[in-house]
Image: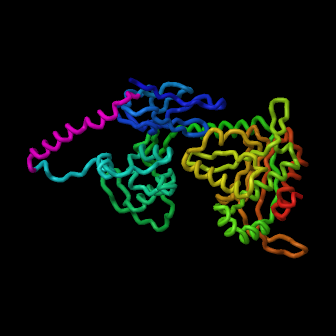
Amino acid sequence: MSTEVRVPALPESVADATVLTWYKQPGDAVEKDENLVDLETDKVVLEVPAPAAGRVAEHKVKEGDVVDADAVLALIEAGAAAAADQAPAEPAATAQAERTAAPAEAAAPSTPEPAQAAANDTAGAEQPQLAPAARRLVKELGLNAGDIPGSGRDGRIHKADVIAWLDQQEVAAPERDPEAGHTAPAPASPDDTTPALELDPSLPGLSGDPGRPEQRVPMTRLRARIAQRLVEAQQNSAMLTTFNEVDMSAVLALRSQYKDRFESTHGVRLGFMSFFVKASVEALQRFPVVNASVDEGDIIYHGYYDIGIAVTSPRGLVVPILRNCDQLSMADIERGIGDFGTKAKDGTLSFEELTGGTFSITNGGVFGSLLSTPILNPPQSAILGMHKIEERPVARDGQVVIRPMMYLALSYDHRIIDGREAVQFLVAIKETLEDPARLLLRI
C-alpha cells in the first residue's frame, strides 16, 4: 500500500515553498518520522518527515520545484523497508566470491572512491545529527559528516561547523595546480597577504576567463524575500532616522556586579539586550504611536509589546519575535533570545516565531558597526539600532572624561510618528539605560 507524502500546511502569509534537498531517493528504505526532504520558504526551512516506514517508491517533484500546501511530494511503499534491507545480502556474498577468485594482480589495494570511502568510514557508526543547512552543504560537497566536529547540543553539526572544518582543511592542504593535475606548494609571496578568491568549478554558474572568473548563484528564497521587504519598506513608508548616544557606564557596572549571581540563579548569562528590551518597553508605553502600525488609512495601536530581535542565520538575517515583553523578566528575555540564536543557527525557527511583532531591535555592534541607519521591518513603524560600545572622551561637569559610549539610531515611519515623538522616545531609552534604577521604579 502506498502512502502519500504531502507538503505540510503553510501559514496564510506563505503562498508556496521550494523543494530544497531530497535525503531519500527512490528505492531507499525509510523509517517513520525520518526526514525525507527540506522545503524552503521565504521565512524558514521545513523538514518533512516520513509519515510511515517503508521504501520510497517515487518522487513526484524534483529539487528546485515550487510546490503549494498539501501537494504530493513522494510515495512510500509501506512495509517494504525490511525487504530493502535484506536485498543487498546476496549481491554482497557474490561480490566477495568474485574478489576471492580474482587474479593476484587485481587483488592489489586500490584507493576507494570518495563516496565509497565515506560510506566505509561511517559504516556501523552512529551518524551525527545535522542541522538542515549543514545537511544540505554536506550533501552538495560530498563530505563525510563523521569527520566534522559539531558545536551544537549532543554534537549537532551546524553550517558554521562545516564551513570552519572546510577552512581548516584548506589551510592544511597545499595549493592545487589545476593545469598540472597535482598538488604543488603555494608560491611564496610575502608582500601579498590577501588570498585570491577561488571559485569552485564543480558548482553551476561559473563563467568568464580563467584569470577573471565569475559565478552566478540564484538567491535563496529567504534572501529574495529580504530584498523584497527592504525595497518595500523604503517605497511604502516615509522613513527617517534620528540619533543619540548613551553612556553605558551604569549598565556595565551593574552587569559586572551581578552577572555571576544572575547566571547561577537563572541559568542564563546577563547580556546587554535585556536592558535594551526593557528600556524599549518603558519608552513604548510612554509613546504608544511608536508601537503602532499603518493599515491603509488607519493607525493600529497595539496594547501589547511583541519585540522582534534581529539575529543572523546561515541563510541570512531573520527577526524572531519575543512576545509580551512587558510581562517578561530580564532572565526570560535573555533565555528567549538565546533560544532564538540557537534555532536560527539550526534553521529550526517556526513560522509563528517569525510572524507579527510591533517593534524591532537590531544590534550591529556585535559586528563592529559604529553607526548605521536600520531599515524598518514592515508593518512595524520603528526599529532601534544598537552599535558598538567604544570608549570616547565626553564632557561631564566641566571635565573631559573617558566613558563607554554607544550610538543609538531610531528609524521610524514619519507618516504617523512625528520627529518630536521619535526624539523623545530615543531620549527616554537613553535616560533609562544611563540610570537603570528607573526600570525598577518605573519612572
The C terminus, quarter of image: bottom right
**Magenta segment range?**
76-104
Q: Position of residue 322 (x, y in %)?
A: 70, 47
**Dominant secondary structure, magenta:** helix
- Membership of 150 in magenta stretch: no
Q: Residue at x 58, y 35 (%)?
A: 41
Q: Residue at x 75, y 52 (%)?
A: 328
Q: Residue at x 66, y 60 (%)?
A: 368
- Membership of 86 in magenta stretch: yes
Q: Which of these two is toward me, 323 or 65?
A: 323
Q: Which of these two is toward me, 329 or 364?
A: 329
Residue 265's quadrant in the figure? Answer: bottom right
Q: Is residue 87 left or right of residue 254?
A: left
The N terminus, quarter of image: top left
Q: Residue at x 63, y 32 (%)?
A: 11
Q: Position of residue 409 (x, y in %)?
A: 78, 53
Number of marks present in the image shown: 0
Query: From the viewer's perspective, is residue 198 above or below residue 256?
Result: above
Q: Is residue 301 left or right of residue 231?
A: right
Residue 375's quadrant in the figure? Answer: top right
Q: In the rendered view, how is the structure colored?
A: rainbow
Q: Position of residue 112 (x, y in %)?
A: 26, 49
